[in-house]
Image (cartoon, rainbow, N blue to C red):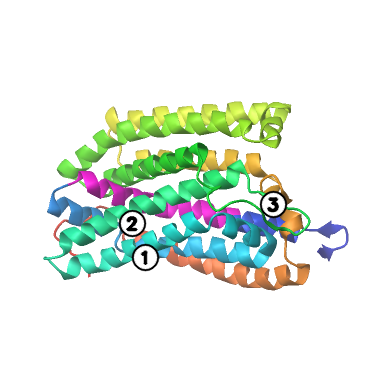
Amino acid sequence: MPIADGVSFDLTLIWGGIIAFAVLIYVILDGFDLGLGMLFAVERDKRNRDVMMNSVAPVWDGNETWLVLGGGGLFAAFPLAYALILPALYVPIIFMVLALIFRGVAFEFRWRTKRWERVWDMAFIGGSAVAALTQGITLGALLQGITVDEAARQYAGGWWDWLTPFSLTVGLAVMVGYMLLGATWLVMKTDGDLQQRMRKRAWPLGAATLVFIGIVSLWTPFLQEGYYNRWFATSLGLWLAVGVAAAVGLCAVLMFRSLTIHHHEYRPFVLALVIFVLCFVGLGFCMFPYIVPTEITLWEAAAPRNSQIFMLIGAAINIPMILAYTGFAYWVFRGKVDPEEGYH
């Protein structure tokens, strides 16, 4: 789309970046939220559970705004990709949505009853675990490829194609990674005995996250020839692989040191987030330029140019607003959680 003499920009690439940005922000913000929910299962003390839930009470529902933006953006900007991905992944996506609903209901109802509090605690734990698992399975199934009828441009696979050892491995990796984010979030937001226990739990969770990153990273290039060639057939791919691996390793070392030697409070969470961002960079390099690996590129799946322009105007207004109110919410509720304050 020309904007001046000799100057133009690619709307499709911009929309690909917007959706990638929305998914990344969702993973960063809702990841620690879901991880905290799974850590509920190993924290039996009611007072500590109340503190854990209060640490995300002001922000948890706003975090999911980015999931809506990513899904809505995919439908509007890349309708062909939406039409191919959804039928292939109906089961994990439906379970994810139901899990998020149960989790949200449990969040509100847990404070309204004593008799059913344990039931809602289990719903909160189960909803968090199922949502995290299905998000990982969805990513794994997308990476391993979707069977497409190229002539009819429709999904041509089976009902259970998404369920494979690789997709389950990615699902477990996401669960463990989210629990690492949740543990480091609680190190940052709590004090006393709860904080110390989360420091101890962050260690094995961090080690397990690194193991899963290694397994998935070594497995992915052998899923499809295009992945292998992108990483190992070019000098750029090799250098990026080495660079990302070294950066992840460095962040991990600093995170472990900040947990045990220096006893930092904010740094472990920030470093865990950086590890996630680095993994996301590797994922983006692996998939680009495909939106349905390795069948449909961004440009093949894109909506008409006029539709992209119309939606971009709305995105240019709404995304800064979402960023502003999200940042404001986190700023207002910064600092430690007061154990004496309830959720209202």
Q: In what element is the residue under mark 1?
A: helix
Q: Are the residues at dot 3 and dot 1 in contact (C-beta closer than 8 Å)?
A: no
Tag 2 or tag 1, which sits nearer the N-term?
1
Write the residue at 48% across / 40% down: 170
**Label 1 with label 2: CB-CB less than 8 Å:** yes
Q: Residue furthest right?
A: 5
Q: Is residue 159 above or below residue 168?
A: below
Q: Secondary structure at mark 2?
A: helix
Q: Is residue 24 magenta?
A: yes
Alpha carbon separation for disc pair 1 and 2:
8 Å
Residue drawn at 43 percent across, 39 percent down: 173
Q: Is residue 28 magenta?
A: yes
- The span picked out in magenta is 20-43
Residue 43 lies left or right of residue 225; in this view the side is left
Residue indicated by mark 3: 148
- Point out which mark residue 101 bears: 1
Decide: is 311 above or below 231. below
Density class for disc 2 (Cα within 10 Å; few <14, some 14-19, many ≥20) is many
Residue 127 numbered mark, or none: 2
